[in-house]
Image: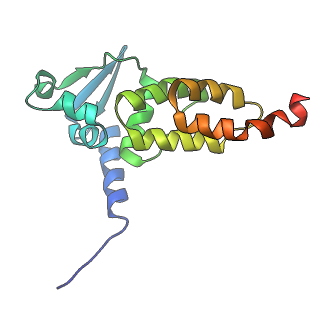
Amino acid sequence: MLTMVDYNYSSKYLETLSNFRKAKRFTDIKLQIEDNEIFAHRTVLSAASPVFTAMLDENYAGGKKNSLVLFYETTAPVTQAILDYMYSGRLDIEMKHVDLLLRNLDYLEMEDAKKECERALITNINFGNCFGILVLAIHNCSTMIRFIFNDILYVIRTEIFK
């Protein structure tokens, strides 16, 4: 028996799909958000999100359409960032969009992505943004709340709070 493993295969495969999406090659679904259209592949959306799986299922009305209007609260930058994550495992977004991003990840049942977002926020927490992140945590993230409250005594003893 011959066994071969290319540990870079899946990342190369996703990179190729991402390039196809950017070039609008082989895309089979158009997401409509506000006045924007974002092209994607049904299989990638469905593999990344149980909600997209349900929306795009052939047995339901949305499954047979080539276009899908997103009625949940989102914006083009947030949806674009989520799609970038689906295709690459990387997400870059301005802090002003993080609250809506977390709500979208929650709505789309993308638990791993939401946990990674929480981890990134925790890693980047500092005195200048800790209360803003606390507000995000209260609305979206139990993991972040635990982290913040575990360290709150340390924070209130620092010079900035004296």
* Residue at the image position 25 percent from the left and 32 percent from the top: 52
In front here: 4 or 136?
136
Q: Where is residue 61 in the image (x, y as percent from the top left)?
A: 11, 21
Above-or-below relation of 154 to 102: below
Image quadrant occupied by the C terminus: top right
* Residue at the image position 27 percent from the left and 31 percent from the top: 51
* Residue at the image position 26 percent from the left and 43 percent from the top: 47
Q: Position of residue 74 (x, y in %)?
A: 41, 20
Instruction: Kindly indicate the quadrant of the structure image that contains residue 132.
Output: top right
Residue 79 appears in the figure: no
Q: Position of residue 158 (x, y in %)?
A: 86, 37
Q: In this view, does 155 lie to the left or right of 50?
A: right
In front here: 114 or 143?
143
* Residue at the image position 62 percent from the left and 23 percent from the top: 135
Residue 122 appears in the figure: yes
Q: Which residue lies furthest to the left in this view?
A: 59
Image quadrant occupied by the N terminus: bottom left
